[in-house]
Amino acid sequence: MDSARMMKVILDYFGVSNAELAKMLDMDQSYITHIINDKRVPSLDRLEKIADKMGIPLWLLIMAGYPKEMERFLGDGRDSRKEAEMPKEISRFVVSMRANLLRSKK
């Protein structure tokens, strides 16, 4: 799992800094920074806490850490039926994940 990518998707989606995210999650900022810099991998307990605090389903949060699988799941964006069938907040997160994936390919 690419924990750094997962955390960057969260930062992008919520438009917050490392410090703001750490405060939102009640975690130390250095822990967040270590995840972003690929020096730490969050435990499942931490992932559950992050997902719960951010209002994101755990499976979707974990999916953000698997870019190739995420790309297969999301497709190229031309078929928006998948997003249309999702609750609005999840759909917005999926769109954010796709944008993050596209930026990383450039």
Image (cartoon, helix red, strand yellow):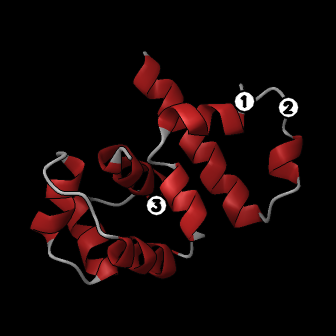
Tell me the crowding category of disc 1: few under 14, some 14 to 19, or many 20 or more residues within 10 angstroms, Cα based.
few
Mark-to-mark CA distance, 3 and 1: 23 Å
First in residue order: circle 3 vs circle 1: 3
Q: Secondary structure at mark 2?
A: loop
Residue 56 picture location, percent across and down: 57, 69
Judged by depth in the image, the label closer to the viewer, 3 or 2, is 2
- Which residue does the numbered mark 2 point to in the structure image? 79
Q: Residue at x 80, y 49 (%)?
A: 83
Judged by depth in the image, the label closer to the viewer, 3 or 1, is 1
Q: Which mark is residue 14?
A: 3
Q: Is residue 78 left or right of residue 21?
A: right
Tell me the crowding category of disc 2: few under 14, some 14 to 19, or many 20 or more residues within 10 angstroms, Cα based.
few
Q: Secondary structure at mark 3?
A: helix
Residue 38 picture location, percent across and down: 19, 46
Rendered position, 15 above or below 101: below
Q: Is residue 52 left or right of residue 90?
A: left
Judged by depth in the image, the label closer to the viewer, 2 or 1, is 1
Say which amino acid is labelled 2: Asp
Q: Are marks 3 and 1 in contact (CB under 8 Å)?
A: no
Say which amino acid is labelled 1: Gly
Mark-to-mark CA distance, 2 and 1: 8 Å
Q: Residue at x 88, y 55 (%)?
A: 85
Say which amino acid is labelled 3: Phe
Rendered position, 52 above or below 7: below
Residue 6 picture location, percent across and down: 40, 51
- Which residue does the numbered mark 1 point to in the structure image? 75
Q: Which mark is residue 95?
A: none
Residue 86 picture location, percent across and down: 81, 59
